[in-house]
Image (cartoon, rainbow, N blue to C red):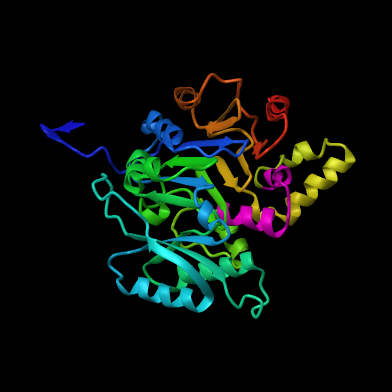
């Protein structure tokens, strides 16, 4: 825009916008890897949903040569030059570091104050002595770095997947990390941020991740304090100054540690109201009453829509009354989730299905699922 004859940045401090933040996810259920052009172009189509204070992508299947190792993406604030030395020493003590390098970037991209971003491909060492499975060992060490090493943040920690995020519009973050030139994957999720209550900074951009779980989110989590304190009892600590962080840790706790399916997790995050439960048949009434009582601190209060991904699966979920929009679609082997139908149609081949999911009901796409179009059609 023009002010007093001068061109100003597109980035601006937000005013409250009740429909903001742009989400997009695309999965090839046959497992074929593809480049980032669809995800990047879809986010450009929804540029009005962000304000340049955060953008990011998660990509699955991008490190086949290191698929058996945890890929740690770590950002180091340039104002804390000692942080990388401390992290290197810590990782060497607790992991076999098979390869590490600065993540390739294009410094000509229009991004703001980028930190040093580094990746390490690691395997746990001595986790048996600590009595931990490999995943638990990694979560514990990630939490240690994020809480104890000033100026260092692990923002991606799964196998054969990676998160790339920062301050900028999504297409600028894609250009900075050269996503369309360097990487292919079978799932891409993306986010354009419009922060309303929390700062726009590199660690606070979406996706949020722990192990191979990633979450992109549109909305406000007014239950953040309760959710955060509950998760701390299980060793998860929120350090990135954004309410969405609790969603990533809650999904890991419920689905990986406790083995609950997404159909149950959806009813924990967005449960039926008590007056509806009272009119259910006995079995459903007992189930939903139990979930509401046992997992009351993980009820997500406030308007939200999330796209969650991990290896072999991608799903979308809204709050019960759909205060944030989401559209689902399918075309051949591709399944799409997006804040706007127009973004899907702008990048997808002719669609076989397109629909608006009901509130509180997950849309689930799984790798190598047979007759996925038929199963999705039943969900419409």
Q: Residue at x 66, y 77 (%)?
A: 128
Q: Nearer the viewer, residue 177 or 169?
A: 177
In the rendered image, which quarter contains the C terminus?
top right
Left or right placement of residue 150 versus residue 255 in this view? left
Any part of residue 158 in sight: yes
Left or right placement of residue 236 versus residue 92 in this view? right
Q: Residue at x 48, y 68 (%)?
A: 98
Q: Residue at x 51, y 22 (%)?
A: 349
Numbered range of the magenta stretch: 245-268
In the rendered image, which quarter contains the N terminus?
top left
- The residue furthest front is 65
Left or right placement of residue 172 versus residue 373 in this view? left
Q: Residue at x 47, y 76 (%)?
A: 92
Q: Nearer the viewer, residue 128 or 297?
A: 128
294 w.r.t. 181: above or below = below
Q: Is 329 within the magenta? A: no
């Amino acid at each position: 825009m023009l002010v007093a004859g001068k061109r100003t940045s597109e980035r601006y401090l937000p005013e409250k916008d009740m429909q903001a933040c742009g989400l997009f996810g695309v999965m090839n259920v046959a497992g074929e890897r593809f480049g980032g052009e669809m995800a990047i172009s879809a986010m450009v189509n929804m540029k009005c949903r962000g304000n340049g204070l955060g953008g990011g992508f998660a990509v699955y299947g991008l490190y086949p040569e290191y698929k058996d190792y945890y890929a740690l993406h770590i950002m180091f604030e340039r104002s804390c030059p000692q942080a990388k030395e401390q992290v290197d020493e810590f990782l060497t003590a607790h992991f076999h570091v098979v390869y590490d390098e600065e993540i390739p970037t294009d410094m000509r991209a229009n991004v703001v104050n980028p930190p040093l971003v580094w990746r390490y491909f690691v395997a746990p060492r001595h986790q048996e002595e600590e009595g931990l499975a490999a995943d638990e060992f990694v979560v514990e060490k990630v939490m240690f770095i994020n809480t104890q090493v000033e100026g260092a943040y692990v923002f991606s920690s799964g196998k054969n997947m990676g998160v790339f995020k920062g301050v900028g519009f999504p297409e600028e973050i894609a250009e900075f990390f050269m996503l369309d030139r360097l990487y292919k994957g079978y799932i891409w999720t993306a986010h354009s941020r419009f922060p309303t209550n929390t700062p726009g900074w590199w660690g606070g951009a979406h996706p949020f991740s722990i192990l191979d779980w990633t979450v992109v989110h549109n909305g406000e989590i007014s239950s953040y304090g309760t959710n955060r304190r509950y998760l701390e009892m299980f060793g998860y600590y929120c350090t990135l100054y954004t309410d969405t962080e609790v969603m990533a840790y809650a999904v890991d706790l419920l689905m990986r540690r406790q083995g609950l399916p997404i159909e149950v997790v959806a009813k924990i995050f967005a449960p039926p109201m008590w007056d509806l439960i009272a009119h259910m048949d006995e079995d459903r009434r007992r189930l939903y009453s139990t979930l509401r009582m046992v997992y009351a601190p993980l009820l997500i209060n406030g308007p939200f829509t999330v796209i969650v991904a991990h290896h072999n699966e991608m799903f979308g979920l809204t709050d019960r009354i759909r205060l944030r929009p989401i559209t689902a679609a399918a075309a051949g082997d591709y399944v799409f989730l997006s804040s706007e139908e127009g973004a899907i149609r702008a990048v997808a081949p002719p669609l076989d299905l397109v629909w608006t999911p009901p509130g509180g009901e997950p849309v689930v796409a799984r790798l190598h699922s047979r007759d996925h179009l038929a199963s999705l059609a039943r969900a419409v």
